[in-house]
Image (cartoon, rainbow, N blue to C red):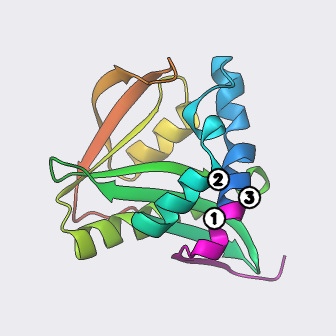
Amino acid sequence: MGMSVIISEATDQDAEQIFKLQYLCFQSEAALYGNYRIDPLVQTLDSVREEVAGDCVFVARLGDEVIGSVRGSVTEDGAAFIGRLCVHPRLQGHGIGARLLGAAEANLADKHGAKRFRLLTGHRSEVNLRLYRKVGYETVGTEQGKDGVPMVVLEKHAGAYAQTA
């Protein structure tokens, strides 16, 4: 490729690329569960724009192309919820997801005072579970997603940000 992947905060101009990337990336999750109505596939572009404007959103860029993204926000209990982590399928397995996760964790801790991080992933999503455990997350429970998918709830304390996996 010859270019470096740059991690940066998303801008409003990134919303459409994030929206399209999310739709592409979550197809494999939908197939895994036989459910093409999972939340990331039914989210609207306007909703993504709202998240980019109001939440902690990071992107991975390769030149002008957004090839990864992650979102986070501080919840009512003071934890930071991290979600919608995705990397373009052709670039998965190169540590980009861990870098995005680390950027979100650092921002949420340093700028928003988060003391712990929480995320959810589908119970059959072994690649996701492996990444999250590798960077320090531990299973703390399960819950049923609004879309019907059984989810694993993972948490870790702030201070040990994700390293490139």
Q: Within the magenta stretch, is there residue 3?
A: yes
Coordinates of residue 142 in the picture (x, y in percent): 33, 23
The circle on residue 45 is 2
The circle on residue 91 is 3
Check whether the beta carbons of the residues at disc 2 and disc 1 lie within 8 A of each other: yes
Q: What element carries label 3?
A: helix
Residue ID at (51%, 68%): 58
The answer to whether 144 appears left or right of 13 in the picture is left
Dot 1 alpha-carbon crowd within 10 angstroms: few under 14, some 14 to 19, many 20 or more? many
Q: Which amino acid does label 2 sit on?
A: Leu
From the image, tell me which residue sits under label 1: 15
Marks 1 and 3, the one that precedes in the sequence: 1
Question: Is any part of residue 163 visible from this angle?
Answer: no
Q: What element carries label 2?
A: helix
Dot 3 alpha-carbon crowd within 10 angstroms: few under 14, some 14 to 19, many 20 or more? few
Q: Is mark 1 on a helix, strand or loop?
A: helix
Image quadrant where residue 32 sits = top right
Residue ID at (75%, 50%): 89
Coordinates of residue 65 in the picture (x, y in percent): 76, 72
Residues in magenta, as a range: 1-17
